[in-house]
Amino acid sequence: MYTSAHDLSSLFAQLGLPDDPASVTRFIARHQIAPHQPIAKADFWNTSQARFLHDALVEDAEWIEAVDLLATLMTKAPA
């Protein structure tokens, strides 16, 4: 049986980004999205990253929990 962890580190690896805890934290701190902005529409993703995030959400894929968590962590608090 195939099992795979779909946590933030694994999501970053899937997106081709550095996936160590410090890099994940740094990326989130530097890349914020506005409330209600779809994570896949952020301008800092390349085309394949945006497509992956979009598909994960639309298809309710196994990555959805990690993508939702990332979106929550990246959302700017209202001023």
Image (cartoon, rainbow, N blue to C red):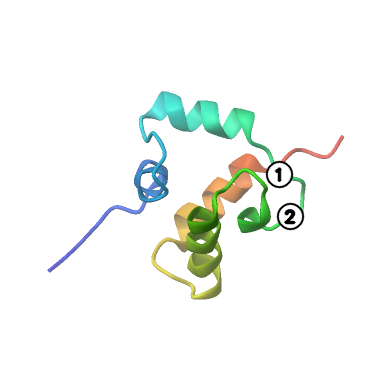
In this picture, is 51 found above or below 25?
Answer: below
Mark linked to residue 20: none
Quadrant position of the N terminus in the picture: bottom left
Inter-mark Cα distance, 1 to 2: 6 Å
Q: Is residue 28 above or below residue 59?
A: above
The C terminus - image quarter: top right
Asked which secondary structure carries label 2, the reply is loop
Local packing at callout 2 (Cα closer than 10 Å; few below 14, some 14-19, many 20+) is: few
Point 53% across, 26% down: residue: 26
Q: Residue at x 74, y 39 (%)?
A: 76
How many numbered markers are drawn? 2
Which quadrant of the figure has residue 6?
bottom left
> Is 42 situated left or right of 48 in this image?
right
* Contact flag, marks 1 and 2 (Cβ < 8 Å): yes
Q: Position of residue 39 (x, y in %)?
A: 63, 54
The amino acid on which the numbered mark 2 sits, given as a three-letter code, is: Gln
Q: Which mark is residue 33?
A: 1
Q: Which residue is mark 2?
A: 37
